[in-house]
Image (spheres, rainbow, N blue to C red):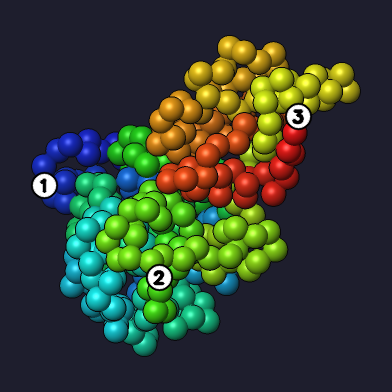
Amino acid sequence: MDTKHWVVDKHQRNLESYPQIKEAAGLLKNNEVVAFPTETVYGLGANALSDKAVAKIYEAKGRPSDNPLIVHISTIGQLYKIAQDIPEQAERLIEKFWPGPLTLILKAKENAVSKKVTPGLDTVAVRMPSHPVALALIVASGLPLAAPSANTSGKPSPTLAKHVADDLTGKIAGILDGGATGVGLESTVLDCTGEVPVILRPGGVTKEQLEDVCGAVEVDRAILTEGEAPKSPGMKYKHYAPTAPLTIVNGSMEFIQSLVKGKQNKGLKVGVLTTSERENQYEADKIIACGSREDLESVANRLYDVLRLFDESDVDVIFSESFPSEGIGQAIMNRLTKAAGHKIITE
C-alpha cells in the first residue's frame, strides 16, 4: 500500500477546508486508515461506525482485537449519539477539560459504534482532542474516529510524524504531519460509570485536577499493582517498550553508575535515561536527557521520543532514573514501568 504524507500547518485558519485535510477525510469516509496528530500523541484514525474500517486499525498496528479503542469526536452532539446516561460529574469534567487530554468511559448506546471499537463491553471511551488538525479532520470527515496511538503495538507511542512513518509506512493510507505533539503522553482515561470516577490510565489531566472539579477520584488497582488486569483502552498488553531491555532504578546516581559499570564489564553497551540536570554526570555508552527534573511536563513531552532514540542507538540495555509519582509524574512512571516490563531495582 502507498502511504500518502501530507504536511499541515496547525496554525492556519479553516483547516477543514484545506486540500490535505479534505483528501485525508475522503480516505476516512472510504473506510481507510489515516494517522493524525493530537495534543497527546499521533492517533491512527478510522471510521468508528464501520467494522471494516476499524479492523484495518488492528491489522496495521498488530493490535489484539480484544483491546478496546477510544472514539475521538469534535462536537458534544456526537457524544450524545454514541453515549447515554451521562452523569452530572462527567458533564462538569467535559465543561472543564474538553477539548483536551481526557477520555471518559461512559455507557454506550446500543449499536452506536462498531462492536470492534468496544469488544464485549457495554461502555465506550470518548474524548474530544484539542489539536486543531485532529478537530479539522473529524469535522471534514463528518465521522467519529476510533483512534489508538499510531505505532506498531508494543512500541513507544509516536509524538512525531516520523515515528508513525517508521512504524506504519506501507500499512496505512496516509499520515497527516502536523508537527510535534504537545503533552507527549496519552490522555487520562476516567471511568465515569460508577458512583466514584476511577482513573484507568493516568495522563495529561492529573488526579489532582480531576478532584478539583468532581471531588473524590479513585485510581484503578492495575495502575498501582502488578498483576491486576487493566480495564483501560491501550493498557491491556505490554506497551511503550524500546528494543533494548529497560530497567528503572530507584537510587542514587552513584548506584546507577555502578549498575552501568557492571554491565559494561560484561561487554554490554549501556544507555542511561536521565534529565538535563544530570546528563553530564554519568559515564555510559549512550546518555539521553528526557526533559528537566524541575519540569516533569517536559519529561512527559520527551519520553516516547527518547525511548525511540535509544532504538536508533546500539545499546544492549538501558537504565532509567525514576521520577516523583505526583501529578503528571504518575503518568510518566506508569509508562516507564510498562516499558520496563515492571523491572525495577531499588538501592
Distance in Å between CA atoms under marks 3 and 2:
41 Å
Q: Secondary structure at mark 2?
A: loop
Crowd class of label 2 (few under 14; some 14 to 19; many from 20; radius 10 Å):
many
Could you tell me the amino acid type at mark 1?
Asn
Asked whether residue 138 is in view, the answer is no
- Decide: marks 3, 2 in contact (CB < 8 A)? no
Could you tell me the amino acid type at mark 2?
Pro
Residue 138 on image: x %, y %: 25, 59
Tell me the residue at 32%/45% (across/down): 39
Looking at marks 3 and 2 on the same chain, the residue that comes earlier in the sequence is marked by 2
Q: Is residue 87 left or right of residue 272?
A: left
Give the residue number, with chain letter if any, for mark 2. Answer: 197
Label drawn at residue 191: none
Could you tell me the amino acid type at mark 3?
Asp
Looking at marks 3 and 1 on the same chain, the residue that comes earlier in the sequence is marked by 1
Label drawn at residue 316: 3
Q: Secondary structure at mark 3?
A: loop
Crowd class of label 3 (few under 14; some 14 to 19; many from 20; radius 10 Å):
some
Which tag is nearer the camera, tag 3 or tag 2? 2
Residue 130 on image: x %, y %: 25, 50
Tell me the residue at 27%/61% (across/down): 213
Q: 32 or 112, which lies in front?
A: 112
Asked whether residue 176 is in view, the answer is yes
Which quadrant holds the C terminus? top right
Residue 21 on image: x %, y %: 23, 49
Give the residue number, with chain letter if any, for mark 1. Answer: 14
- Please, which residue is most extreme toward the right here? 266
